[in-house]
Image (cartoon, rainbow, N blue to C red):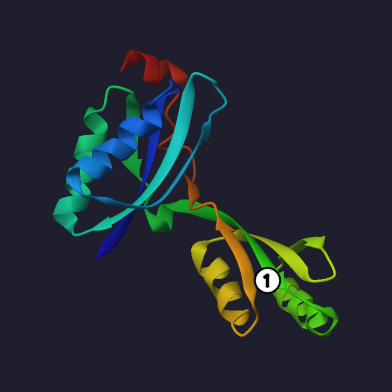
Amino acid sequence: MKKKVFQLLVDNTSGVLTRISGLFARRGYNIESITAGTTTDPNYTRITIVASGDDVILDQIEKQLSKLIDVRDIHELEPDDSVYRELSLIKVRAGEKERESIMTIANIFRANIIDVTPESLIIEITGNQSKVDALLKMLEGKEILELARTGIAGLTRGIDKVVSVKELEEK
């Protein structure tokens, strides 16, 4: 199975995420992660979707997404030409004895401790998926109470693939 990261610019209308996720559900495709947020122009939303499958399935996903009425632009975020980031919050059981070792691990990964209670810590980490996965691996043996991962947000490097609002409105 291969993974592809797709970036969509869509009209910021109600139901757009439902239509996109419905397309995946109807065809039995899997969404590994999906993030969405408005752009500098509130009329448009940028959606980043990570999907997996063979080449035929991934090509089909891109074609089917591009046919949706709300989708104004779609392209693949190639790993070598893009920047990906993920935010994760990790709540770890941390009594007095474990707290220092967990904080040391978090510091190695340039993660932030954003909440401390007598029984736990919440770690915030931002980075690529492998950085988040590496921190989680280092926390093996510690009790992770809760984990929240945003999924990938990404942009292409440089200005070659930037789509202006004017170009979107012409489509």
Q: Nearer the viewer, residue 165 or 45?
A: 45
Check the picture and name the quadrant holding the N terminus.
bottom left
> Which quadrant of the figure has residue 32?
bottom left
Q: Residue drawn at (80%, 78%), measured in percent from left and top?
A: 95
Categorize mark 1 by other alpha carbons within 10 Å: few (<14), some (14-19), many (20+): some
Q: Residue drawn at (61%, 64%), measured in percent from left and top?
A: 146
Q: Residue drawn at (54%, 20%), measured in percent from left and top?
A: 42
Q: Nearer the viewer, residue 80 or 42?
A: 42
In the rendered view, does 142 fall on the left or right side of 15? right
Amino acid under disc 1: Phe
Residue 92 vs 60, above or below: the answer is below
> Which quadrant of the figure has residue 160?
top left
Residue at which label 1 appears: 109
- Horizontal and vertical percent for residue 122? 73, 63
- Horizontal and vertical percent for residue 22? 28, 37
Residue 120 vs 7, above or below: the answer is below
Q: Residue drawn at (43%, 20%), measured in percent from left and top?
A: 13
- Horizontal and vertical percent for residue 19? 31, 31
